[in-house]
Image (cartoon, helix red, strand yellow):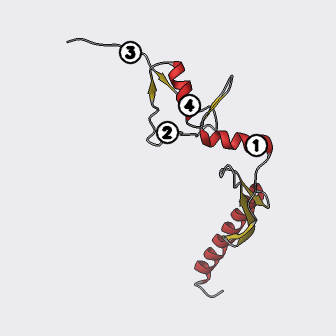
Amino acid sequence: MSFDSKTFVVVTCDGKPDCKPWIDGASPHFDGLLDALAWLRDNGWLVADTRLLCPVCTRVAECEATSHTWSDWLPTETNGVRYRWRWCERCNEATETDPPLEVLIQRGQAALDAEQILSEADRTLGGNR
């Protein structure tokens, strides 16, 4: 029985922490750094001095540097809380809400708390509110 040891290059994206640039979760293996860099450049990756960004993270970085191209505002309601939201039509990753997300979370929690109080009151009063 014989063994053959081989060294190869695997690429990861330096973008957002949860970035998964490979569809099947497995990075392609390259025989060397120059092969990897050539493939990355040919396939939409940003290859900079200190960073490698997949095509999605590249679009997000470009938008963050030059400003997002926002869609029109869309009115929305969730759990009785009305708000509006929009997304970046260029990077398709950034979203924005009005009021801001932190406020929506507080309002949403307040709506859920109120619903729970009403449900408990219905049980206590036997549905005769």
Position of residue 9 in the picture relative to residue 127 (left or right): left
The residue beneath circle 1 is 64
Q: Which mark is residue 6?
A: 3
Type of amino acid under label 4: Leu
The mark nearer the N terminus, 3 or 2, is 3
Work out whether mark 3 precedes mark 4 in sequence or the reverse, and give the earlier one. Answer: 3
What residue is disc 2 on? 22
**Circle 2 crowding by C-alpha within 10 Å: few under 14, some 14–19, many from 20:** few
Residue drawn at point x = 56 percent, y = 31 percent: 40
Q: Residue at x 66, y 39 (%)?
A: 58
Helix, strand or loop at label 4? It is helix
**Amino acid under label 3?**
Lys
Alpha carbon distance from label 1 to label 4: 22 Å
Left or right: 1 in relation to 6: left
- The residues bearing labels 1 and 2 have C-alpha atoms spaced at a distance of 23 Å
Q: Which mark is residue 40?
A: 4
Height in image: 107 above or below 18? below
- Badge count: 4
